[in-house]
Image (tube, rainbow, N blue to C red):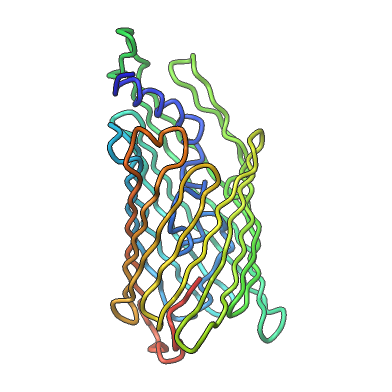
């Protein structure tokens, strides 16, 4: 099978998912930006603006394989309101270019002294360009270039304490169609997510966090990620994840300063493309801006 045919197949695969873009939890380090799957997610740290940037290169060694860039900002307005902005760019070779921009509004209510519940609303715009004109399969001409734009609306709920979180969400409640040359048509399905995690204090310097994200798509089998992360002396983080029938993932991170963190992950492919790639790489940069000089209030880095 030729490389062009691989690109063509990958492109057709993304047509199914492009209209919803990265609203699927395709990041191995999504735990650092859970607003990707749940618009109600909040950092819960007033005055601290959390900025982040992520780069992912998937299925290394496969020509035209997906690459993703994500930039985001969590901005607490006060103790009850937090805004999040996300921009994501996906591409597969010269075939698929997908740009998503959305803003989340989350409202936090105190259920007790130690437990809070937030409600989130996501609004945004997703644009997709598909270019199959240079993709010839078996000598036949490819499809023409086409583009589309879709309005996105999502919602979620997020329950949390200092060491526990759980949430349910649907990042896009508006299904939409996309067609290629009027001969290939796909409808985006509604995605639903459930997330949960708990932080155990093993000792004064070691925290252990098991977590999961469960994904349900209309017309598709249920799938999930299971993760286990360890934070050592509030500086070093090591973890491992398993994505059902897709990948085994190693994660490492370091808090270079109290406000600056670097994370890296490697996915070992377990799916159908296992023999055709050398895995996936992901790097993330996180930085906190302390607007009101409250950093002394937060004695350790946020672990979710």
Q: Work out whether residue 54 or residue 163 is closer to the camera in this orientation and state it.
A: 163
Give left or right: position of 86 versus 135.
right
Q: Work out whether residue 247 or residue 22 is closer to the camera in this orientation and state it.
A: 247
Identify the residue at image location x=43%, y=50%.
Answer: 101
Q: Residue 152: name its quadrant.
A: top right
Identify the residue at image location x=39%, y=24%.
Answer: 146
Q: Relative to 13, is 266 above or below?
A: below
| Number of marks drawn | 0
The location of residue 229, given as percent across then percent down, is 48, 68
Q: Relative to 271, is 119 above or below?
A: below
The location of residue 106, given as percent across then percent down, is 58, 66
The location of residue 108, given as percent across then percent down, is 62, 73
Q: Quadrant of the N terminus?
A: top left
Identify the residue at image location x=52%, y=49%.
Answer: 243
Q: Work out whether residue 53 or residue 290 is closer to the camera in this orientation and state it.
A: 53
The location of residue 72, given as percent across then percent down, is 40, 60
Q: Relative to 113, is 174 above or below?
A: above
Q: State the residue lying farthest toward the bottom.
A: 296
Identify the residue at image location x=33%, y=7%.
Answer: 140
Q: State the residue lying farthest toward the right.
A: 111
């Amino acid at each position: 099978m030729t490389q062009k045919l691989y690109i063509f197949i990958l492109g057709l695969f993304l047509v199914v998912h492009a209209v919803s873009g990265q609203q699927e939890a395709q990041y191995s380090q999504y735990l650092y930006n859970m607003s990707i799957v749940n618009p109600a997610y909040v950092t819960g740290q007033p005055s601290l603006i959390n900025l982040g940037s992520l780069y992912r290169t998937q299925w290394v060694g496969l020509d035209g394989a997906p690459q993703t860039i994500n930039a985001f900002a969590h901005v607490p307005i006060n103790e009850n309101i937090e805004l999040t902005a996300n921009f994501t760019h996906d591409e597969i070779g010269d075939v698929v270019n997908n740009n998503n921009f959305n803003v989340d509004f989350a409202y936090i209510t105190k259920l007790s002294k130690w437990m809070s519940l937030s409600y989130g609303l996501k609004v945004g715009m997703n644009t997709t360009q598909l270019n199959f004109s240079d993709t010839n399969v078996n000598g036949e001409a490819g499809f023409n270039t086409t583009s589309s734009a879709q309005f996105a609306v999502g919602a979620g709920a997020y329950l949390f304490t200092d060491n526990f979180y759980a949430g349910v969400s649907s990042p896009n409640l508006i299904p939409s169609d996309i067609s290629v040359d009027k001969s290939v048509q796909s409808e985006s399905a509604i995605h639903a997510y459930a997330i949960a995690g708990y932080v155990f204090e093993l000792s004064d310097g070691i925290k252990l966090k098991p977590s999961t994200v469960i994904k349900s798509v209309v017309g598709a089998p249920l799938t999930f990620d299971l993760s286990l992360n360890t934070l050592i002396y509030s500086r070093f983080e090591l973890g491992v994840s398993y994505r059902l029938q897709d990948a085994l993932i190693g994660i490492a991170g370091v808090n270079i300063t109290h406000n600056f963190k670097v994370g890296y992950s490697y996915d070992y492919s377990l799916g159908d493309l296992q023999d055709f790639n050398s895995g996936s790489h992901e790097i993330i940069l996180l930085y906190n801006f302390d607007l009101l000089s409250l950093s002394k209030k937060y004695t350790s880095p946020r672990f979710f």
